[in-house]
Image (cartoon, rainbow, N blue to C red):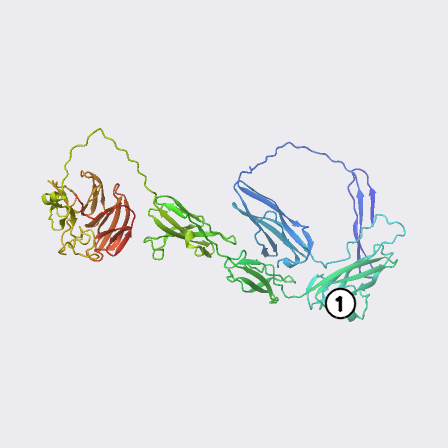
Amino acid sequence: MVGRRSLNDNTDVAGIDYTRTSTGSGLAEQRQWKYVFDTKWKGTTYAYKGSITINYVPKTKPGFDGDFDILPDSTLTYGDTFKLGPKDIETTGSCTFQSIKFRIERNGQVYTGNAITSKTTDDTYTLAKYPYVMLAGASHDVYMQINTSCGSDWIGPKELYLMDPNLGGGGPTPTPTSTPPPGENRPPTAKIAWVKAGTTTPTGIIPVGTKVDLIITDFNDPDYPDDWVDVDYWDFASSTDWLKSVPDEFGDNLKLNSYTNITASGIGSHKVALTVKDLKGATYTAYATLNVVDSKPVAVIRGPSSVKAGRPLPSEFDGLMSYSPIGLKIVNYVWTNVQTKYMTPGTETITLKVKDEENRWSDVTSHLLNVIPDDPPIDTLTVPEQSTRLGTATIQSQAYSPDYDNLASRKIEMKYDANNDGFSNDAWQTVVNGNGDADSFTFTPSRIGKYVFQETVCEDYGLCGNTNGQPESERTLNVVNIAPIADVKTESDVSDPPESSAMLMTELYNNGRFYNINRGAIGDKSNWKIDTGGILTSKSRTPLTNNTRPYYGTYNSTILSTSFGIDGVPRMSAFTGIQSSPTLTRIYFPDNPIIVPLDDDKYTYIGAMGSISAYTKSMQLVWKRDIFNGYPFQLLSYGSTVVAVGESGIGRSMVIGFNRDTGQELFRNDTLAAYVGGYTNLLQIPNGFIYGSFKFNASGGGRRAAAISLC
């Protein structure tokens, strides 16, 4: 009972607290009476001077902070669904948010969840998702980790308490009124519980087959000793079939104070009720639930449901949500068909079984993975139909991935129809070989004719596509010349041209001298003749050559015929100039003796031991290059390029090209064997030149032979 009275001012609070044990029907009762006294008091308030210092950290400083809630409450009944909800996660300065994860601990056992990349996504736990560390009737520490570009940190712990669903029942004891009306009967109270056989500790979850007792843990009547309480009846029939059968073992007696040594053989949730009644007819009903579970652990697979063929899984398979219904630790996981990549489209089945710390194995559970086909990229090229020599042409790729994969690499290749006979006998030349962003090729063709292009693109995981399915005509560029334009204007102050005398060719032939610049001496007329009409011609049936020394000839004597003149006798090429009184000037060359000279329409070139030099027609040095490791063999001039062949080492030859105006090196090959194919000359051809059995592709204008000139 509770009573109140007022004391005088300034008195201390007085209280009486004692326990009385009384006997009556049912179990022993423990009752407690409290007297609460009201009092009035006076106090003195003191004020103190002081200051408060606040250290404010600007938001521009790199850092992060945050918090989380346990929802709907931090005290729940085991089996309830709850959420771990992040909140107030902020970063400052240059820090950027990356992810969060939660950790649950109990008695040294630790469960860590997967990373969550959202600041606001809750981590939800249903009974099926409870980690193995969670236990009914126990307290758990919960943490949240925040991961940022500036580092990571754990927040917590916060307590999560999971009540045993079967500890007690019937609800709280009603709060008595302070002064019951005279003659009003207050109802009794009671509590019941399932316990393991022979114990008094309530339990809510047990393995099937366990022996249990059903007992009354407390009942009393607030009006005792004026009123008594007793068992009215037990209700086993309103629940499960197994629970309905329990009274059979006790002679169908529904008024016992306890039922002991019951074998819990029915899997499921079983709720029993006890109704008690006092002497005045007031009743109260208490409840208790027993969850009988299969003691085997339960395997749970967590992982992706789909993946592209040949690609890594978006997340790994794990069995961390596997659990023991009786709270034991999972100690072993046995998987089948877990791979890092699945190559064949279709449905894959992944299985898992687990074992608890008491060596119980779970049933095998399975997970279906849909392997989606990975489509290769589709590729076409946009190629202009026509362009002009020295004009600009752009080849544009139209490649794309139909399933939106990343294009990681591209290669564009080109063929030139060198002989105007189709592309089958021409080689591909790579013009673009880069990443997926290099989607075009712009070039300036230097030769007229046809060019064909092809492209290959590859995704970041290896599937490739190409333009082989696109018609060749759509990938072909035709390069043509631009018609020349001439605009000539001449003028002169001379009204009448000066007098001139024509000289007949017969007169030049009979009276002039033939000068052989190869030998530096006067030549003979044996390779020349005057035809009818005064026309001067060569008697040679083949292009002139030198069969004895490879340094001076125009063509390779091992390739072409060596038959010259009417008589077919090989002799020095008499490519000469007719002049009246030639003047010879000795050139002083300070470094090394002259080995090979060459004269074209603009410069005179001199090849010496280890070098090549270019002079103007007045013999002023234009440039000089030290190139050979030995003697030069031959020189060749075409267009704006001069080519030199010489020794690059013991047993090796070098072919090197220069810009004839600047001496800039344009190309070189220093790996050829010396005197390839025997005594070998440089041979000018339309698309470059031939040296021995090697063909060198090049671009440029007119054809000139080595070491000979018409003066």
Which residue is at a point 32% across and 53% down the rendered structure image?
418
Q: Quadrant of residue 651?
A: bottom left
- As drawn, the residue found furthest toward the left would be 511
Q: Nearer the viewer, residue 291 or 93?
A: 93
Q: Nearer the viewer, residue 172 or 519?
A: 519
Point out residue 25 in the picture as x, y percentages from the top left corner: 84, 61
Point out residue 431 in the picture as x, y percentages from the top left corner: 38, 50
| Residue marked by disc 1 | 241
298 to the left or right of 492: right
152 to the left or right of 544: right
Which quadrant: the C terminus? top left
The reply to whether residue 438 is in sight is: no
Q: Quadrant of residue 570?
A: bottom left
Q: Nearer the viewer, residue 221 or 66?
A: 66
391 to the left or right of 104: left
The reply to whether residue 225 is in sight is: yes
Point out residue 307 in the picture as x, y percentages from the top left corner: 54, 58
Relative to 360, is 86 above or below?
Answer: above
Alpha-carbon neighbours of circle 1 within 10 Å: few (<14), some, or many (≥20)? few
Q: Amino acid at mark 1?
A: Asp
Which residue is at a point 34% across and 48% down the rendered structure image?
448
State the SS at label 1.
helix
